[in-house]
Image: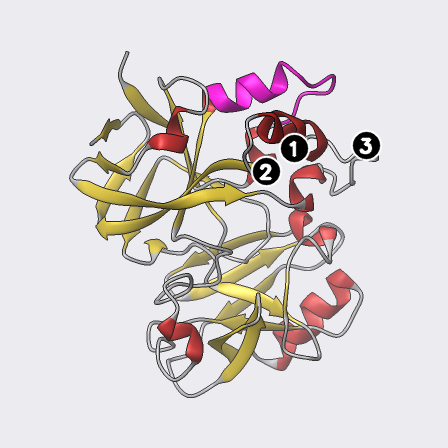
Amino acid sequence: MSVRITHIFEYPLKSSRGNTLKEGNLLFTGLRNDRRVAVIDEKNRIVTARESANLLTIHSEISSGILVLKAPNSKDLRITLPLDEPGQEATLFGLRVPGLVLNSEASGWISEVLRGNYRLLYRGSAQNKGSDAENNAKVKGMGYPDSGAVHLINQKTLDALNSSLQNKVQIENFRPNLVVEGAEAFEEDHWSEISINRCRLQTRDRTVRCVVTTIDPKTAVRNNEVEPLATLGKVRRAEGLPVTFGIDMEVLSGGYIRIGDEVVVT
C-alpha cells in the first residue's frame, strides 16, 4: 500500500485553529501562509496556546496581503499586512526572531480576545536579517514555528495511540501540517527524506510534544488527566525514547502538494 497525503493544514496565526487545504504551496519556509503572525506580550515574548489556550478558538486567514482574524463573540478583524521595513524583535524559545508589529487596531483586538496586553507580530519576507535567530537553522527564514518548517504525522501512529486511550484524540491535537496514511505506526520515526510531487523534504528531528496536545482543539479546555501526553509518555519511555510524536521536516525543494499525492520515502 502506498503512502499518501490525507490532510494539509496551515496556521497563519501561530497557535490559532488550523485551516484545512486541498492543496498547498510548499516553500523553503514551509506552507506559504503558515505561522506568519504571532502574538507577543509586554516583554516581547511570543505567546502560544501553552500560555493562552483561547488562541485555539481564533480562526486566521491570509489572502491577497490581508490578514483576517475571527473569534467567538468578537467582530472580525481585517488588517492589510505591512510592507517590509525595520520592525520589532521578539523571543521564541530564548532566540530572537524579527517581525513587524501590526497596528493599534490589531493590538486592541487580540488584547480583548485574550484578555491581556498583547500585540501581533508579522514576519514578512524581508524579516530574515539582523537577529541571532538567523544563525540558527531552527527558525531560519521561517515564520514562527516551534521547530521545523513542516510538521508531519502518520495516521496509523495516531490510531495506535488512540487504542491506548479511553477518550480518543483528534489529528488537530497535534497541530500537523501534513497527515499521511499507508505507513505502519511510528514508521515515520525512521524516515530521513521524502518526496511529494517533486517536492523534497528532509527530516530534522522527531517532534517533542508539550501540553498543547492536552487542550481540546474545539473547546480550548485542558484535559484534567493530561491526556494524551501522559499515555504517549508511557509508550515512548518504554522504548527508551523521549516523548515524541510525528516528525519535523525541512524543505529541500518546493512546489505544490495536494490531498492524495503519493509520499515516496527515499
Q: Secondary structure at mark 2?
A: loop
Q: Residue furthest bottom?
A: 86
Relative to the observer, which residue lies in front, 10 or 254?
Answer: 254
Q: Write the residue at 42% across / 88% down.
A: 86
Residue annotated with mark 2 = 243
Which badge, 1 or 2, comes first in the chain's sequence? 1
Relative to the observer, which residue lies in front, 184 or 6?
Answer: 184
Examine the image and state in which quarter residue 133 appears: bottom left
The label on residue 225 is: 3
Q: Position of residue 134 (x, y in %)?
A: 37, 74
Residue annotated with mark 1 = 233
Q: Which residues are magenta?
A: 156-169
Task: Give the side of residue 2 with respect to residue 207, left or right.
Answer: left
Q: Position of residue 33 (x, y in %)?
A: 40, 56
Amino acid, disc 2: Val
Relative to the observer, which residue lies in front, 178 or 190?
Answer: 190
Q: Report, in whole angstroms, how far the alpha carbon at label 1 lies from the one at label 2.
A: 5 Å
Circle 1/circle 2 CB separation < 8 Å: yes
Amino acid, disc 1: Gly
Q: Position of residue 226 (x, y in %)?
A: 76, 36
